[in-house]
């Protein structure tokens, strides 16, 4: 049986395009996930025993500010020895606005390793397990030698109870890098879009967490490349890297759609074609 969680909206969730920013959907999923865990026998896992491995998020419609909370319906998918998958449907006024999947694992932060579930922990997850419809794959790309680069520093408020950057904040880092995806000097991509009466809509975003990002004085960097172009959509791949050792700490695959002011898809503007020529992604090498 699905678990339903009521998630209130905040006025500050609304972005410059007049609707809730895409990154906030991951925040709402997190609120529902915490609500679900706190409701049952595995509430003890909150705070020091779970880690997000990946997210897949489909954006099906805009979310607008309202004093009526969203309804997030959560289901448990595959349950393994140390990992479990969650599925979500997000509704505003019973309109389906997003679907998502998350993979989480149990993690011993003191020993810095993944740990297996106890029998009782796995039993609680498995009792709720149902078959989840798989999402269409959009991964398979990597950032090549030529990429758009954006540096950022971690804010103190980006940290969570585990003393590393919360998984939701990583969506923000990728978004800030996308805004700056312009090969020529001048206004950023969003400013150009506003001047041309265009909007950019995120249709899908998958994030894989490959290492921990921590608060420190030294900056991190995001490298972004264009994987493929359609008539009205573009697929990007981006990586958060540690410049101190070049480790990739997170990777995102994002599908963007170009739209007019009403949200109707329109052909991609020149800036995206120029970006694809300047920063082409490369196919991932399968092991």
Image (cartoon, grey):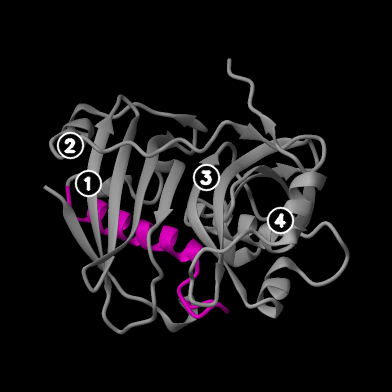
Q: Is residue 168 magenta?
A: no
The reply to whether callout 2 and callout 1 are in contact (CB within 8 Å) is yes
Q: Secondary structure at mark 3?
A: strand
Q: Earlier in the sequence, mark 2 or mark 4?
A: 2
Give the foreground label among 4 and 1: 4
The residue sitting at the right extreme is: 185
Image point (18%, 33%), residue name? 126
Q: Residues within 10 Å of mark 3 (few under 14, many from 20)?
A: many
Residues at marks 3 and 2, CA–CA distance in whole angstroms = 23 Å
Mark 2 secondary-structure assignment:
loop
Residue 161 in the image: above or below residue 225: below
Write down the residue under mark 3: 207
How far apart marks 1 and 3 lie (CA) works out to 20 Å
Give the Cα distance between marks 2 and 1: 7 Å
Residue shown at 46% from the left, 41% from the top: 54
Tag 4's secondary structure? helix
Magenta-tinted stretch: 14-40
Residue under label 4: 272
At x 27%, y 75%, the residue is 69
**Reading the chain from its start, which is encountered first: label 3 or label 2?**
2
Q: Main secondary structure of the magenta part?
A: helix
Whichever of callouts 2 and 1 sits on the residue coming sooner in the sequence is 1
Left or right of 91? Residue 255 is right
Q: Nearer the viewer, residue 166 or 174?
A: 174
Q: Which residue is mark 1?
A: 75
**Dot 1 or dot 3, earlier in sequence:** 1
Q: Is residue 250 visible?
A: yes
Q: CA distance from mark 2 to mark 4?
A: 40 Å
- Give residue 179's quadrant in the image: bottom right
Disc 2: which residue: 130
* 29 in the magenta segment: yes
Q: CA distance from mark 3 to mark 4?
A: 22 Å
């Amino acid at each position: 049986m699905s678990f339903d969680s009521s998630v209130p909206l905040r006025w500050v969730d609304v972005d410059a395009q007049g609707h809730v920013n895409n990154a906030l959907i991951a925040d709402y999923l997190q609120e529902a996930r915490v609500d679900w865990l706190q409701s049952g026998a595995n509430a003890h896992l909150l705070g020091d025993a779970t880690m997000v491995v990946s997210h897949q998020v489909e954006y099906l419609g805009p979310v607008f500010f309202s004093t009526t909370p969203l309804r997030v319906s959560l289901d448990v998918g595959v349950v393994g020895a140390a990992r479990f998958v969650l599925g979500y449907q997000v509704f505003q006024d019973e309109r389906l606005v997003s679907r998502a999947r998350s993979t989480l694992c149990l993690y011993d932060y003191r020993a810095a390793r993944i740990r297996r579930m106890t029998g009782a922990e796995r039993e609680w997850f498995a009792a709720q397990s149902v078959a989840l419809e798989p999402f269409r794959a959009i991964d398979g790309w990597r950032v090549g030698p030529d990429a758009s680069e954006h540096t950022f520093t971690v804010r103190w408020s980006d940290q969570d109870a585990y003393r590393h950057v919360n998984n939701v904040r990583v969506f923000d880092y990728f978004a800030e890098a996308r805004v700056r995806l312009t090969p020529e000097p001048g206004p950023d991509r969003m400013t150009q879009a506003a001047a041309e009466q265009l909007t950019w809509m995120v249709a899908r975003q998958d994030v894989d967490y490959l290492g921990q990002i921590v608060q420190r004085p030294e900056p991190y960097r995001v490298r972004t490349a264009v994987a493929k172009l359609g008539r009205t959509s573009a697929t990007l791949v981006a990586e958060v890297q540690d410049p101190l050792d070049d480790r990739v700490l997170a990777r995102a695959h994002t599908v963007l759609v170009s739209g007019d002011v009403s949200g109707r898809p329109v052909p991609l503007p020149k800036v995206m074609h120029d970006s694809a020529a300047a920063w082409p992604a490369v196919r991932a090498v399968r092991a």
